[in-house]
Amino acid sequence: MTLPTTPQQLLDIARPHFDEHGPNLTMTAFRRLTGVPRSRIVQHFGGWIALKSALGYPAVGAPRRQVTPGRTAESILNALRKILPDAGPGITLYEFTRRTRISATCVYLQFGSWSELRQQAGLSRWPPARRLFTDEQLLLDVRHVINLSGKDVTQESYSAFGRIGLHTLIRRFGSFSAALTAFAEYMDELYHRLPDENDRLNYIRSRMDPLGQIRPKQFPPPTGQAIASSRMSLPLREGEMEWSKFNRFEHKSTFDVSPSPK
């Protein structure tokens, strides 16, 4: 449903639900029935009790919430800017309230929403997505699919056999063909840095071990459809390679091996 943008629209949504469920309808039940977030209720009426009063129901419970004295829009904005260097652009409302002791209600009353506060602080409306897998782990998963299928990897075989997920691979590299190009360059670099096959296999195993904790897929899937993959958080390790915007690998410290003697 379309979210209300004015107090009257919110009242029009709430009235039939109160008529059906009675004056004891709770905000939790109302949100579950309508999908209207708490922030909209606080923004337009200051709280659930005030909304009930506007509909003519007894205001039983706490009075209308007010902004804590001193919690001006400027002070809230300055508090967010102060913790940004440490918290980073991915800061959430929960983390903001925990660090600053400024309640979510104050944010809603002064800015209407968390995303509006983020924008006024110079951040994107939504926090950037956090990467669960490194570029190297994605490319090694492509190698894993090739070894298991015994032929060149395709979108169908990767969807069926990959441990991470086709959409993650495409989002990271821009397209499936770009991912295969990155994989070819990665393997060339790997053969150059680790010419000994045993060293190369040991290195690959050390990077693939965490992926082994993800439930493997069947190949091909019984229904002919791709099976959704699990997700897990894997931090970037020392020596892993990052794929830059220039389509070149940037090394943290090349690989975890000593340089070959000249």
Image (cartoon, rainbow, N blue to C red):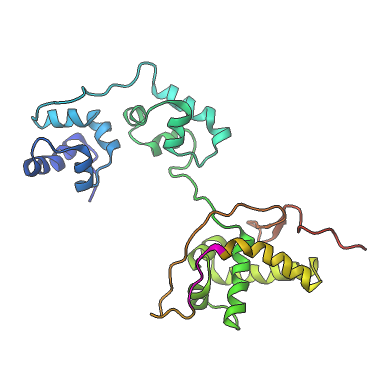
At which x and y percent is residue 164?
52, 65
The correct choice, above or below, for 234 with respect to 184 in the image is above
Magenta stretch, main secondary structure class: loop
Which image quarter is the C terminus in?
bottom right
Q: Is residue 32 left or right of residue 227?
A: left
Q: Is residue 34 left or right of residue 108?
A: left
Count of all numbered marks drawn on residues in the image: 0
The residue sitting at the top extreme is 69
The region drawn magenta spans: 213-218
At which x and y percent is residue 96?
45, 33
Q: Residue at x 46, y 35 (%)?
A: 95
Q: Residue at x 6, y 41 (%)?
A: 19
At which x and y percent is residue 180?
61, 72
Instruction: State the residue in front, 83 or 234.
Output: 234
The correct choice, above or below, for 196 with respect to 11 in the image is below
The residue sitting at the bottom extreme is 151
